[in-house]
Amino acid sequence: MSAFVEFDDVDEFSASVVGQPGSRVFFLNARSGPHRVTVRCEKQQVKAIAMYLRHVLSDLPPPEHRPMATPIESAPTGDPLFVLGPIGLGYDRRNDRLLVQLEEMLESDAAGDDDEAEAETPDRGHIRFYVTRSQADAFCDHADVLVAAGRPSCTWCGNPIDPAGHACPRMN
């Protein structure tokens, strides 16, 4: 049975990173009271979540208060529940909350296997929770800082530049 976690409200929603630029590992963290969940993800997934949340927030009244993000700069406690696959994001007008749904990546996702009729699809682990506009805004600001703290991009090709240098395909 895959993991299933659902929080109506969370006390914390943050991204964290472990490692040095070029070999960093990203995590998404959610905490509701004493219950904490961590999911391993990619930098681009953190960036995409922040971009979407900012887009939704731009159509809503500004948050009334802005809580400080509680970034987790070291390795999260415990192992990640799963590696992040599909992401679901939305807005619940009734509760004035943003929905975040994080689903587990399956082997068939990584292999690019789109033939669902071939075999019975195993249960996908997932985490679902709601965040306030203030929490979403704080997440976006913190995610932007984490993503920008990586390797600089090459001016000509856009690929990341390692500390040892970079073989730019446009300069060869």
Image (cartoon, rainbow, N blue to C red):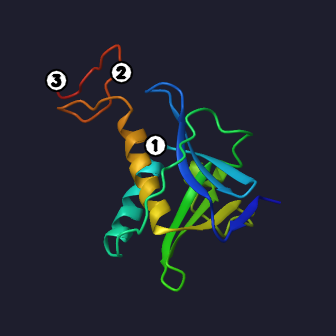
Front residue of this view, candidates 96 and 5: 96
Mark 1 — residue? 43
* Count of picture labels: 3
Local SS, label 1: helix
Looking at this view, name the residue that lies furthest to the front: 65
Which quarter of the picture shows residue 66? bottom left
Instruction: Tell me how far mark 2 sits from mark 1, CA to CA.
Output: 16 Å
Q: Is residue 4 above or below residue 28?
A: below
Disc nearest the viewer among 2 and 3? 2
Mark 3 — residue? 171
Disc nearest the viewer among 1 and 3? 1
Front residue of this view, candidates 14 and 127: 14
Instruction: Tell me how far mark 2 sits from mark 3, CA to CA.
Output: 16 Å
Which quarter of the picture shows residue 63? bottom left
Instruction: Tell me how far mark 1 sits from mark 3, CA to CA.
Output: 26 Å
Mark 2 — residue? 162
Ranked by sequence position, the earlier of labels 2 and 1 is 1
In the rendering, at what x and y percent does residue 160 appear? Answer: 32, 30
Question: Crowding near pointer 1: few (<14 within 10 Å), some, many (20+)?
Answer: some
Looking at this view, name the residue that lies furthest to the bottom: 94
In the rendering, at what x and y percent does residue 168 appear? Answer: 24, 24
In the rendering, at what x and y percent does residue 122 appear? Answer: 75, 62
Tell me the kind of residue under disc 1.
Answer: Lys
Q: Is residue 122 above or below residue 166?
A: below
Local SS, label 2: loop
